């Protein structure tokens, strides 16, 4: 998957998702972010997983909507500081079939995390943070999904992504 974000920060990245079981996905994200417009771009790394609790897919747990729980780790090393986060996430969505065979799935993600910021001067702070992401996935066909998402968090952003299924 490729992702582009704009807003409080400009970012670009790639995501590799691997299905570990019928109900569990793992993802690795690697990207570049410029959070203050100073052209000091830094690397960001994230790993996460989610476990489907309820799914509209009849081969999994049959339910009225999709719901998953998971965890994540994120690390960002900037010129003047480094930040890491460790947290949990709740994701819910509802797929809507369209007449042309594609589908739209509005979704939301609530995350709670411990975030630690270490300044290069030696001081550090840790805080409990809460974030919300809301968006929509357009399943164009069996191999391509497109995403639009808004993030309300420390960094408020708008994200666009395209997912290609290759395996």
Image (tube, rainbow, N blue to C red):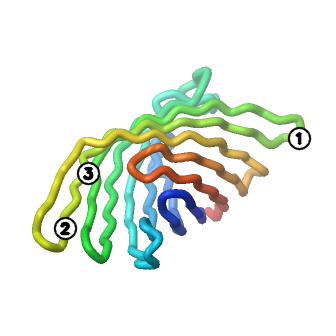
* Numbered disc 3: secondary structure: strand
- Which comes before the other along the chain, label 1 or label 3? 1
| Quadrant holding the N terminus | bottom right
Residue depicted at 10% across the width and 69% down the height:
122
Q: Hey, which quadrant is residue 80 in on the image?
A: bottom left
* Residue at numbered disc 2: 119
Select label 2 or label 3 by which is in front: 2
Q: Hey, which quadrant is residue 164 in on the image?
A: bottom right
**Frontmost residue, 102 versus 23:** 102
Residue 111 visible from this viewpoint = yes
* Residue at numbered disc 3: 115
Residue 64 appears at what percent x and percent y?
Answer: 61, 21
Picture layout, residue 70 above or below residue 92: below
Structural distance between the alpha carbons of marks 2 and 1? 52 Å
Residue 43 appears at what percent x and percent y?
Answer: 39, 73
* Numbered disc 2: secondary structure: strand
**Frontmost residue, 36 versus 12:** 36
Q: Residues within 10 Å of mark 2 (few under 14, many from 20)?
A: some
* Residue at numbered disc 1: 100
């Amino acid at each position: 998957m490729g992702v582009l974000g704009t807003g409080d920060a400009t970012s670009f990245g790639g995501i590799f998702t691997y299905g570990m079981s019928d109900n569990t996905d793992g993802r690795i994200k690697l990207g570049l972010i410029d959070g203050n417009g100073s052209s000091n771009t830094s690397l960001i790394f994230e790993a996460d997983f989610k476990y489907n609790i309820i799914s509209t897919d009849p081969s999994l747990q049959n339910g009225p909507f999709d719901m998953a729980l998971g965890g994540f780790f994120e690390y960002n090393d900037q010129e003047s500081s480094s930040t890491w986060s460790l947290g949990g996430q709740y994701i819910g969505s509802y797929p809507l079939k369209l007449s042309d065979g594609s589908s739209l799935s509005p979704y939301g993600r609530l995350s709670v995390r411990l975030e630690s910021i270490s300044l290069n001067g030696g001081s550090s702070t840790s805080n409990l943070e809460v974030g919300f992401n809301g968006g929509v996935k357009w399943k164009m066909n069996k191999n391509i999904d497109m995403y639009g998402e808004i993030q309300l968090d420390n960094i408020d952003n708008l994200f666009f992504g395209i997912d290609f299924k290759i395996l």
